[in-house]
Structure formats: C-alpha cells, structure tokens
Amino acid sequence: MISLACRASAGAALSLSLKMSAAPAAICAPAVAASASSAVAGRDAAFSTARANSCTPHVVRSKGAVQTWPPDRGQQRATPQRVASRAKQDCTRAPLRQWWQSFCGQAGHHSLASISCQDRAHIGPRLASLGMGRVQHTKSGLGRPVSSLGRRPCRGTPGRQHVPAVASASSSTPGPDVGPEGPLRVALICGGPSAERGISLNSARSVLDHLGSSVSDVCKIGVRIDTYYLSPDLRAYSISKAQMYSNTPSDFDFKLDSTAMGFGSLEEFTQHIAATADIAFPALHGRYGEDGGIQALLEGAGVPFVGTGATECMEAFDKFRSNAKLRRMGFATLPAALLEADAQSMPRGESVEALRKWFGETGLDAAVGKVVVKPARAGSSVGVSVVRGVGDVVEAASELMAQGVDDRVVVEPFVDGSNEFTVIVLASKRTQADGTSSVALLPSEVELRLGDQESADEDAIFNYRRKYLPTAQVHYHTPPRFPTPVLDEIRHSAVALFEGMGLRDYARIDGWWIPPESPADKRVRDGRGRSQYGSVVFSDINVTSGMEQTSFLFQQAAEAGMCHADVLGYILRRACARYPEVQRKLLPTDNGNMQPAAEGNHGELNRQKVYVLFGGDTSERQVSLMSGTNVWLKLRTLMSVDAQPFLLAPTLMGNEMQVDELGERTVWQLPYNSILRHTVEEVMESCESSVDESRALARRTFKAEVKESLALDDTECNADTEAAPEPARLTLAEMAEKAKEEGAVVFIAVHGGVGEDGRLQTLLCNLNVPYTGSDPDASRLCMDKAATGEALVRAGVPGLTACPKETIHMSDVAKKMHRDPTWTKRLWDRVTSTFGCADICVKPAADGCSTGVARITCPADLEEYLRALCAGQPRILPGTLTTSHPIIELPVPPPERVLLEPFIQTENIGIKPDGSLEWGGCSPWIETTVGVMGPKGEMQALTPSITVREIGDVLSLEEKFQGGTGVNLTPPPPQIIGEEQLERIRANIAAAAKVLGLGGFARIDAFVNSKDGQVMVIEANTVPGLTPSTVLFHQTLAEQPPMYPPDFFARIVERASRER
C-alpha cells in the first residue's frame, strides 16, 4: 500500500533564491532603441526559442527562503556585471544616439509624422544597429513551415481580385503588395496595471490575428504590426508575437527581463514608437488604458494613435464624472453618490455624511436600501457589488480602497426590473442627414438566466465571471427584445453621447432600458431618453471596447455585414484619416476605399475545403463553441483553405444515440453573424429565428442602412462572403455526404460525447470522409479515463504509469445512500485505505474541461457531491464543501459513472504580486499538459506546460477557459524541471500516445516528477480545447522555428487529408 499524496514538512522545503543574469537579447533600449526591419527577423526567432536566453543562474542558499525566479528586478539591474555591460553598450551607441538627437532637432520634434519617406529609409539601418543581440536556437523539426497551405488575405466579393497578405514582419524585402511608402506600421500596445490586463492581451491578440493576416481591406500596401507590453509597474517591453498567444500576462511576466526587449523609461518607449511606427493601436483596458494615461503619453511624444484623446478619456472613464457631464448635456441619468478615500484608504467622513443625505434624497432607506457599489475608474465589472444600507456601502467601499482597486467609489440605486444593453458606435466617413458624423450599430441585450440555485439571489449582476466565461447563466440578444422606439432611442442617444463626449473612432456604451412600470424609473432624473416607454440611461463608457474573439464589437459589426478584419480595418482607417502623413499610406481609390492589387491574386485558387464542426450536448459544448469558432477564424486566414462553420445542434437524447441514429442529428451551417455568440443556445436561437421573415427583413434593412451611413463599399463588408449568407439546416449524415462530394476535411471540435467517444469518427470513416484527430478505437479508449489508465498500466513502459482509480456507477448511488446512511463513510474508508491517501479527487468518468472535478477531504463532502449529481444540480456553489473551492460546474445530464482517485499533492507554484514566480519545494510532482502531434505510432511530444492553480485545489473551469484567467508556464522554468528531466518527460508522453493509439494531434494531461521525469497520466484528450489562447499554441510557438496558430491548424488539416 503506497501513498501518492506526496507531502513535505516545512523544514524539508528546498530553500533557494535564484538570481538570473540577463540574456543577450534582453538589452534595455537606449533613447531610441529601435528594432527596425532588419532586426525584426531575429527578434521573433529569439523570443520564440523555447529555452533560449536562460543563463546559468547564480544560486544563493539561505535557510527558510522560498525559491524565486527572477530576483527583484532592481537588484538584477544593479549587478556590477550588468552595470559594466550597459556602460559598454552605452559607449558603443552614444554616437548613434547623438546623431538621432541631432536629427530630431533638425526635424523639429520626435514624431514620425514629420519624417519624410527618404529620411525613414536613411535612418532605418542606423536604428537597427541599436537593436537586438545574438539569437540562440533549439532543435526541433515540428515547427517547419507549411508548404501547401499559405496565408491568404481577407476575401472580397465573388469575382473580385484580392490583395495578397503582406510579407511577414521579418522580411526586409518589400513584396508586390508593399508600395513606395512601405507597409503601414502599427504599434500594438497591451497589458497595463489594471485588473483587466488579461482581457487586454486577448483584445490585442484579436487585432494581431485579423489585421496582421487579413489586410486587403485596410490599405493597399499592407500592415506590419509590432507588439508591445506594459507590465503592472508600467515598465515597457517589446514582446514577440508568440507571447501574444499566452493565456494571461502572468504566463510571461516573470521572465520578461530574459525574453523581451525592455525600455529604460516610458519616454524611451514612446520615442522608439515614434521612430518605428506610423500609428499606435492601444488595446489596454481599465487604468492607464482608458483613463487617458497611455493617450497622454502618446500625445506627448507626437505619436498618432487609434481612439479617443487623453482629456476625453479621462472624463469618460470616471463613472462619477461622466454621469455628471451626461446630466449637464441633458441626458436622463440615475442619481449617483461618490465616496473618496482619506490618507488611511478609508472613506472620508464628509463623504459618508453626504452619502447618508443622498440616501434620503433618492428615496432609499438608509438601513436597507439596495444600491450598487463600484469603483469609479475600473471596467469589466471589477469590484462591482450589490449591498444594502449605508453601513454596507461604507464597508464595501473601504474594502475596494484598501485593496487599491480605486480611491473613488460610486454608489447608484439598484435598477430592479430593468434591461441591460450595450451598443458599439463607430465614427463615420461622412456627415449624416441629421448633422452627426458617427453611427451606432445594432445593440445587444444582456439577459441573466439564473437556475434554481441562483434564483434566490435577487442581487445577481453581470459580473466578471459571467462576462468572460461562456455559461448558460448569461444570454445575449442581438438585436434586443425591446420595442422599436426604444431601440431607435438607444442608437440615436448613443451617437449624441459619442459626439458630445468628444469620443473618436469607436467606443462601446453600456446602459439600461428601464420600463415605466419598474420602481427604478421613478428615480431617473429627467432628460434625453425619458419617454412613454420608460427611460434609456447610459451607465458606462468604454473608450477601448473589448475585442475578444466573440466580443460585442465583432457581434454587432457582423450584424452589419462586417467581418473581424473589416471592422478593425475600418477603425484603423478612421484613425489614420486624422494624420495626413499616415493617411498617405492608404492610397485610396476614387471612391475613397482600397484599390485591389492585380499582382499576387489568390482569388481563383482551388482551396482545400474544411468543415469545422462544433457544439453537441455535453457540458463542454460552450468550450466547443469557443474552439470551433477559433479554428474557423484561424483557417480563414489561409489562402488555400475554404473553411465553413457547422454547429452540431444539442439534443437531450444525443448521448444515447447509436452511430446509425447519429446521422439524423441536426446540423446548422452557420453565417458569420450567427457563429459569433456567447453560447451554443444563442447560436441555436439565431439560426431558428432566421426562418422568421420579418426578422430577416429587419436585419437586411439594418445592414443596408449601416453600409450607407458608414459609406462602406463591398470590399469592406465581407462577412456574407466568408460563410453561408443564411443558416442552413441539414442532418449530420447530409453534412458528411456533402463533405465527401466536395472533398472537404471535417475538423472535429466537438468536445466530449459523440465528438470524442468514437461514434462521430466511425460515421465519417464509414463514408470515407477525412477528419482530424484520432481514429475511432483510440477515441473510444481515451474517452473512458478508467480504461485509459488500465491500458497504460498494462503496457508496463518504464517511467510511465497512470493514477489508480475506482469507478462508481451512479445508477443506484441514491438508493444506496438512502438505504444505508453509512454507505458513503464505508466507501470513503475503503478508497482512502486502498490508495493510502488522506484526500481523494472525484470526477466524471467521461467529461473533460474540469467539469465536476473536486477535491474531497471527508466523507460528508463526498456525500454532498454525490447527492448534487443525483439531483441533477448544474453546479456546486462556493462554501458547500468543507475546504475552500470556486464554483464547481457539474455535467448535465448527470454522468453514468464517476471516478475516485488519490489526490496528488503537487508543487505549490505561484505568481507573486510583482509578477515573479515562486515555489516552495513541497513535492516533486507537478501538474502538466503536453500536446502531441504526428501520425499514429510516431507522435512527438511538444514542449510541456506547467499548469498553475490560483483559486483552488484543482484546476478550475475559470482557469482553463475564462478570458484573462489562468496561468501556464511554457516551457517549464529550468529551475523547476531540468533539461534532462524535461526530455525524459517528453519521451514518456510520446510513449503514452503510442500505447493509446493516438494520431493527428491530441493533448495528454499528467503529473510529472521533476526529479526523475516519471509521468503519471491523468487523461488523454483526443479533441483538446482549441480556444484563442490554448496551451497548444504556447507549445507550438515554443518550437523552433515557431509554428503560429494558422500554420498549426494547417498542419492538422494536411495530415487528415493525406492519411485518410
């Protein structure tokens, strides 16, 4: 009997303090440390090298310390070797800096707008000599370029010629699409100090994906994007494009000094951008991104940028100030109170007294009146709560102030019985008939759908989790289910707000429609928006709208016929129009739009058809929607691929069907606007509503109106040419037959259920239709976690094993617990005795995505968990079990079997507030996830990733799939897993893939021993998650040369087409 719960006493913890020296590529930028075009190629290669740039650490042993990597940055920069090195660099570069300062003095200022084309060509080589150091490489054959499926530009209307995608940023030779001015150079900036920096990374990734690869509708000569990051302490870095695919900034914060080019100050950063970019695209959210901080920095350096100016941002971002201005502008508003912090970060006494008075004036009971408390200067619902009475308000405000969220806290009445909405506004090329020069898109309604467990929570709000984690708790309706006059009022008032507040290019405006029968309507102050239909009230102004893959910006733009690249290109062009020297690069045609290039046209290529299939019945269907959408959008950027999205409609009977019945399942071929939804249920609603001719007509009318108002031509409205113009209903068998006729590859992105248990693979095999992933036998085996473990143990591969498991059949669990009150206790005693462990891990036998996974520490918790499953509960709420845990999402319908495993105590790896990494040496076991690629029997393991738990004992659904959440360390820091152990782990993972018969691509989750490389497999995923920041991207980008997401998917499609 052995214990797998590896624990160590505090005294046994390994105590190390590690000090990393800077890598050759990690040089601080001088005054204008420009990485010009000749240095860009080396930069991305260096940044993406898996374990390059990590020097032998200087180890200092001190008893009781915790391991940290890297050390305090201030100490690191102060080492004698570093000072001497920097002094040598400064001596070398001083003449160049003097030349640059002299040049700028002659030019008049540091803005690139004042530098002529000839001067830019002249200074480029000189600036490049201030750039990167030598490049180190790793060995791998997985990252070789794709030959037959290259990148393609955004498609235009049928029969129209297209501009080829711009040459990569590493190319120093202009391609046929690069005019005399060169490509439009965009500095994309993300990160920042706010709690929304993870969302910022997601937004910037979308800009990179859709402007960086689909440029035909942006400008004739293409776009070159360079990526920059601001750390929480506002240090500026030039980062690689590979790092943009990280899950959160915490994935790379701890190693920025050795993997990125740092700037000595923000001034040097903006000088660099002024010298190397035509325009900046800030994609920062919250503090420093939307409060005027980054805008003031760019304005001060004379750098053109996308979006609203600094002064207007500052006024719009502060919720109390914007509310006051809207009231002065004549808008209907909700009453608001402000609490400000004193020197001790507590609400000032006079603010509290004013709050008591405000409660009375607003008609709220000072003891129990329900209000919303929120930071004045934060977004994404960060810090928002619903409380009752003055006392609770002061307590909530004090907490926000003490945590440093904000020292200004706004209080508003809770709007009972109201309807939340959000609307995108775009600046127009032309003045409208009513004198305005901007256009509101079709708004979206936000509906909270709370289950029985949450129905008692009448204070539920649209919080961070509901915004960024796709669950059935939130439903978006685009357009809203509002009366037409209310819809018109929202759009017209949003335009008036946009222009009255001095906003530019684009913005997202949130608000409420409060019906006249709602009690909250009586508290609304009179103004624009009040009518017989109630009140339209604006609550939040977002000068930098979220730009995640299916964000409101892209949803609403798709309703107007614009794809991702269309709307981002439109926003970029509107910004460029303010700067004559930048606008010159756009070379418009007579009608004001892009002129198609005759050379390099790929419009007539015989493209490989790919049917991307996602959805299904399981609790993983929302993640499947994220994966399928991402695969489809990435494949769209390949010029040799014609990708079409298909939804496998959910049905309660789906998990019980046989293969022949499976063919009768409903599948929807989706148009562009239908796929960009929050949940599978929303996609279904969009498809089913398409049969309503009145709604279809209204949508067509709206498209025509927006197209005219924004002065768009056909090259700027590509959504309808990128997918089916309307939803088309067919059966799965009909879809498969159609794929066979067209020679299409079916890209399977259906997680769990029929997508991974072999039935879908069998159906496609029977019809001889090529598909991605493993064959039916391997899929069936890996779907059953217990069978997977048994197969690995039977194989007897040295260094490879699986967690021991006990299977519980749920069919009679409820009866056993009812008949015998001691049954659960006896089960607990038997399992813990057999496994030799103190705690157990319980999980469904055939569900993934962390659904239903929990740590159980006592028999009472095990019984609580099993009763929740038997009752069909959708989730276990925090505080239900003995130990602290987040929400545990449960599979619906309940699983047939659950597994009990020993809980493996893994190394406690954490991210410190300053972004550095720490671990305590409590266990040699580390949880990892590893991608595998290649033909069956010959799969190779990619670089493993360490998964870091931050909010519980097991990796949660939020950490895996919630936007801006979760940390993965790729590659593992060498101080945690050595090179020799890492290679052993990769070999053992590849052996596991061979034992299981995997093929194509897959992901294996495992505990690994950092001391000897032993692998204990948790599960194998034959259809792994493929969301926008999937860990598989981190791993393919860590190969050399790096394999970017579209190329990764192209490799998968190529293999499927060739092997089947």
Image (spheres, rainbow, N blue to C red):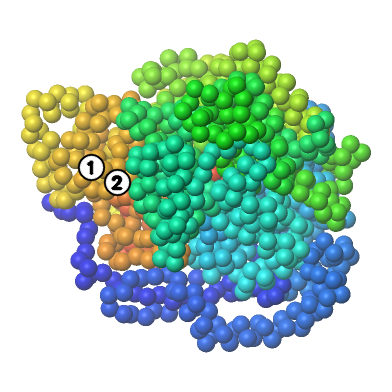
Circle 2: element type: loop
Instruction: Residue 931: tell me if it is visible.
Output: no
Residue visible at 15% across and 40% down? Answer: 860
Asked whether the residues under the numbered discs 1 and 2 touch, taking CB atoms below 8 Å apart as contact, a structural biologist would say yes
Pointer 2 residue = 885
Image spot of residue 754 (x, y percent): 42, 26
Q: What residue type is labelled 2?
A: His
Above/below status of 920 relative to 667: below
Q: On the rendered structure, is 901 left or right of 280? A: left
Image spot of residue 640 (x, y percent): 69, 37
Residue visible at 47% across and 41% down? Answer: 361
Q: On the rendered structure, is 835 left or right of 1021? A: left
Circle 1: element type: loop
Closer to us: 293 or 747:
293
Which quadrant of the figure has residue 458?
Answer: top left
Cα–Cα span, label 1 and label 2: 8 Å
Q: On the rendered structure, is 293 left or right of 822? A: right
Closer to us: 561 or 3:
561
Which quadrant of the figure has residue 781?
Answer: top left
Residue visible at 35% across and 48% down? Answer: 391
Q: In which quarter of the image is the C terminus?
A: top right
Pointer 1 residue = 881
Residue located farthest toward the right when viewing the structure as drawn: 590
Q: What residue type is labelled 1?
A: Leu
Instruction: Residue 650: tell me if it is visible.
Output: yes
Residue visible at 42% across and 53% down? Answer: 352
Closer to us: 798 or 37:
37
